[in-house]
Amino acid sequence: MVLVKLRKRLKSLISKMFKKKSDVKIGLYGPVNSGKTTLANKICTDWLGEDIGKASVVPHETREIQVKEKVKIESNGKSLTFNLVDTPGIATKIDFEDFIKHGMKKKAAKQRAKEATKGVIEAIKWLDNVDMVLVVLDSTKDPLDQVNITILGNLDARKIPFIVVANKVDLKSSKASRVREAFPNYKTIGISAKTGFNVEELYNHLVDAV
C-alpha cells in the first residue's frame, strides 16, 4: 500500500514537472517603438498564421499585455512550445504632448499617456511570470540608453535568461555591431522583424536556449 502511494505521488510530481515545462513563457521587452509587436506578429504569423497585435509608429501603441498561447516553433530538428508575451514599451517618462505631435487631440493624448503609464507598470510586474526574455532594441539608435541598461540590469538581477535582439537591420542607419559592442557579455542577434531577415537564426537560438 505504501509503495502504491509512493508511485502515485511520484507520478503526480512528474506530471507537474512536464506541465510546468509546457507552460514556458517568453516575454518581449524593450524600449518604445523598438519593434516588439512587429517581431511578435512575425513569430505568430510564421507559426500560427495570425497576428498578436497592432504595430504603429505612434509611441505606446501596445499599452496592455498581449499573450498568444501554445506557439510551437521548429528549428534544426528541434521544437519548442511556449506562450508568447508581448509587453508595452518601457519608458522612464511618458508625456502626453508626444502624442499630440502625432496628431492626437489633447484629451485623447492624455488618456493614452495614462494607459501607457499603466502598461509600463504591468510590463515590469510580468517579469515575475516569464521564463525567458527577448530584449528587442532599435539598432538605429544608441544602445547605451538608460532604459536599455535598466532592462538588462533587472533581468540580470532576477537571473532571467535573455537574448538581445538588435532589430531594424534593414534600415541604412542600423548598426547592429554597436549593440554587440555595447553589451559584449550578452548574446546578441541582428534581425529585421519587418522583412524577416535572420529571424530563422533567432528561432535556432530560442530552441537551444530553452
Image: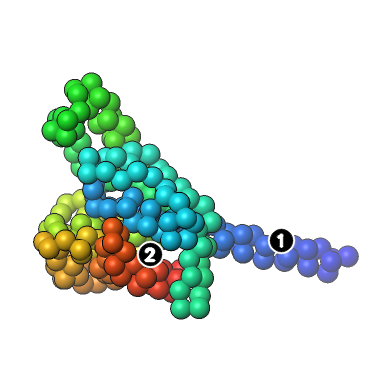
Q: Is residue 82 left or right of residue 153?
A: right
Which quadrant does the N terminus fall into?
bottom right
Q: Nearer the viewer, residue 118 or 193?
A: 193
What element does badge 1 sit on?
A: helix
- The residue furthest right is 1
Tell me, for residue 177, which label it has, or none. none
Q: Is residue 42 visible?
A: yes
* Residue appearing at x 27%, y 53% in the figure: 35
* Residue appearing at x 78%, y 67% in the figure: 7
* Residue that badge 1 annotates: 12
* Residue appearing at x 48%, y 70% in the figure: 74
Q: Position of residue 3 (x, y in %)?
A: 83, 69
* Residue that badge 2 annotates: 161
Q: Amino acid at mark 2?
A: Pro
Q: Amino acid at mark 1?
A: Ser
Q: Position of residue 80 (x, y in %)?
A: 50, 67
Which sits earlier in the primary sequence, circle 1 or circle 2? 1
Q: Position of residue 102 (x, y in %)?
A: 16, 34
Image vertical order of residue 59 relative to residue 100, above or below:
below
Q: Nearer the viewer, residue 201 or 24?
A: 201
In which quadrant of the rendered view does residue 97 lie?
top left
What element does badge 2 sit on?
A: loop
